[in-house]
Image: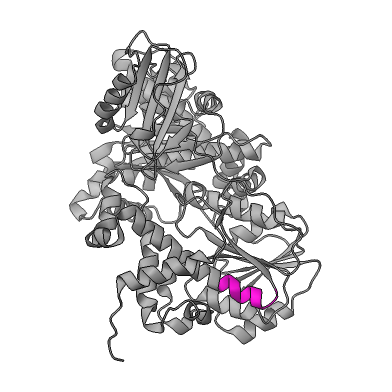
Amino acid sequence: MAHVDVSWPELVSKIRCGCESLTELVVDDGPDSRAAAAIWKLLTAPEHCAVVDRCDVYLERHGLQLESLCRQIVARGPFGHVVEFGAGKALLGRVLQELMPGAAVTSIEINEGVLGFDGAHAARIVQDVNDTERVVQLLRGLQKDGRVCVVAKHLCGSATDALLRALVLSSVDAVFVAPCCHSKIKAWDGYCNAKFLADRGFASHEWPMLIKLLAVSRLPLDTTGDLAAERCFSSWRRWESTFGGRAAMLGLGRRARLLIEEGRAELLRAAGFHAQVVEYAPATSTSENMLIIAESAPKGVPAAIRMPRSGLILHADGGALRVAQYLMELRGAAAAQGGDLLWLSIVPCSDDAVAILGLDVEHLLASVKENAALLAQLRVVSNIYPFSSSVLSLDELPFPPQVQGPFRLAVTPRSLMSKVLEMASAAGMELSPKQFSATVSVCRLWDGSLGYSCLPRGTWNPVEDLRSWEACPLQLQGEEAAVCRILYRLEEWRSRLGVIVSGAGVLLHTHQEEAWRKALEASGAKLASAHEASIVIVDWKRSFSDGLALLAESPAPLAIAVIPIAVAAKQGGGKASRASQMLEEVGRTLSGKRLSAHHLLSNRDQERTIVLRSITLFLDVCWLRICIV
C-alpha cells in the first residue's frame, strides 16, 4: 500500500468538528459504600487466599473503578443474570452477585485455568469473543430468570468491537462495557462502526494517527515537573507547540477517545438500544475511564455522583503508593463493618503525595487522626495540606480570605511560596508564623491545579507534631525510640496481616536484638529457641541470606521477614526489578510454604515484608484478620 501523509492540523480539525455534535460527556465517578464493603470482604475472604495474596493492588486502583461501575449497574437493575466478558478472575461479576442476591453469573474468559472469585450460581466458559457466531449462540441460550445484562471491564482493543457486533444480534436487556487498549486495534476494519467516523470526514489511512493521538490521553495528568510524568511525556514533547501545549494535547486525546466510544454507542443505538457514554471512574485511577451504557428499555437515568475536589494532601516522601494502599484498606474495612466510608477516594498525586477526597475537610482531618495514626507514628507522613476548593492558577486564589487574621501560610511545593507571599502582601494580609488565628493552605493537586483552604487554628495547626496524635505506649525517648518504632511495626502487623505476637515464643534473627527483645516483652511475647518458637522474625538487612536459611529450616508455623531489596542491587535493574529478583529467590528457597509479599508503611522503599504460614494457619489468620480489622 502506498504511504499516505496525514496532516496533524487536518486531523485535529476533524476531531474537534466531530465532537461538536456530541452530547456533553457525563461525569459520574462517585464511590459506593455497599460495593466497597463487598469488594473488601471478597478480597480478604479465606476461600480466596489462592486467588490474590495482596488486596492493596486491587483496592488502590481497581477498587475505585469497580465501585463506580457496580453502582452504575445496580442503579439500572436488578438483573437476574449477569454475563461478564473478559472476566479474568471474575471479581466484577462476583461483586454484582453480592449486591444483587440471587442473580446468576456467567464468566466468559479466553484463557483456561484462571482461578477466580466465582461463587454459587456462577458458570465459567472458555470462549474467544471474536467468534461472533458462538457468542451469539451463548447469549441466546442463557437461562433467563429475570433481566439479562452484559458487563465487561477493560475488554482489550477490538475485543470490545467483536462483543458489540455480537450484542446487536442478540437479545439482552442492558450492556455495560468499559473499553481499553485502543492501540491494539491495528486496522480501520477492526473497529465496529467505521461508518460513524467516515460520516465525519475521517479516512481509513488516518486511523493509525487517530489512535496514536488517543494514546496521549493515557499520559499522566501531572504538570508539576514530577520526573515519572516527565519521562512518560518525553516522546511527545516536540509536538507540544503544534497542539497548543500539554493540556491541549491531553484534551485532544480525550476527544479522540470520546469519538471512538460514541461510534460504538451509536452501533447499539441503531440496534434499538438507548445508549450513552459516561466517565465512570476518576481519571486518577485509570485513563480508560469511559463506559458505554446501553439499555433496551431504560427505567430512568440515575442522578450522577461526581467526586468532590476537596480533601487533604498528605506528604509522604517516596511513600505515596504505600499510604494510598493503607488508606484504602481502612476504608474497605470500615465499609465492611456496616459503617460509612471514612473518605470518598484516595488519589496518589506523585511519588511523594497522596490526596484524600471528601466533602468535609474538618471531618477528614478528624477521621485521619482517629483511624490512621500509624501514618504519623511510623513517620511515613510528615505534613498535611487541606484544600476545600481548587483553582487553575495562583492568580485565582481568593486573597484576602474572608476571616480574621493574622494568618500562617502552608504551601507545597516550596517553589510556590515566593509568589504566594507576594500575593498575600499585595492583598494586605497580616502574616505571623507563630501568633496566627487561621492557616491558609495552597497545594498542587494531581492535575496541576491548586488546592486552597483557610481554616481556623483550632481546626488545623500545621505546626502540630503529627506524632502527638497518639502517644507512644511506653513513652520511650532517646535510644529507646527504636523500641517504640518496633512496637508500631508490630501493631501494623497485627492490624494488616493478622499477626499477633502476644503469648507467642519468638525466634529472632536481627541486628537490633535488644530493641526487639524489649518490644516483644512489652507486647506479651518471649524469646524462644528454634524448636520452641511458634513465630520466626528475620530483620537483618545485609545479612539477610543467613536469615533466609533460618526460615527454610525452622519448623515454626509462622515466619515474617523484612527483605532488604537493596541487597539485590548487584543483579542490576531498578527497584521493582530488584524486588522481583529478591522475591523469586525467596520463593525458590522456601518452596512448599505459603508466601505472601507486602509493602507496608513501616517499610522503607527498599524493603518488602514477606509472611510464610502453613496452609492451616493461613486460613485461620485470614479469618482472624477480618475480625480484627
Quadrant where the N terminus lies? bottom left
Q: Which corner quadrant of the image does residue 241 belong to?
A: bottom left
User: Which stretch appears magenta?
Assistant: 264-272
- Above or below 77: residue 315: above
Q: Position of residue 16 (x, y in %)?
A: 43, 66
Q: Nearer the viewer, residue 502 or 623?
A: 623
Figure quadrant of the C terminus: top right
Q: Nearer the viewer, residue 435 or 579?
A: 435
Residue 211 visible in the displayed image: no
Tally of marks: 0
Residue 418 lies in the magenta-colored region: no
The picture places residue 434, in percent across and down from the top left corner, at: 34, 10
Q: Residue at x 46, y 55 (%)?
A: 286
Q: Is residue 488 left or right of residue 3?
A: right
Q: Work out which residue is located at the far left of the displayed protein and give it.
A: 570
In which quadrant of the rendered view does residue 442 lie? top left
Image quadrant of residue 175?
Answer: bottom right
- Find out whether residue 266 is within the magenta segment: yes
Instruction: Provide the major secondary structure of the magenta segment.
Output: helix
In this rendering, position of residue 86 left or right of residue 520? right
Q: Is residue 594 above or below residue 556?
A: below
Residue 557 image offset from top left, x and y in percent: 49, 42
Measuring 32% from the left and 69% from the top, which residue is drawn there?
Answer: 9
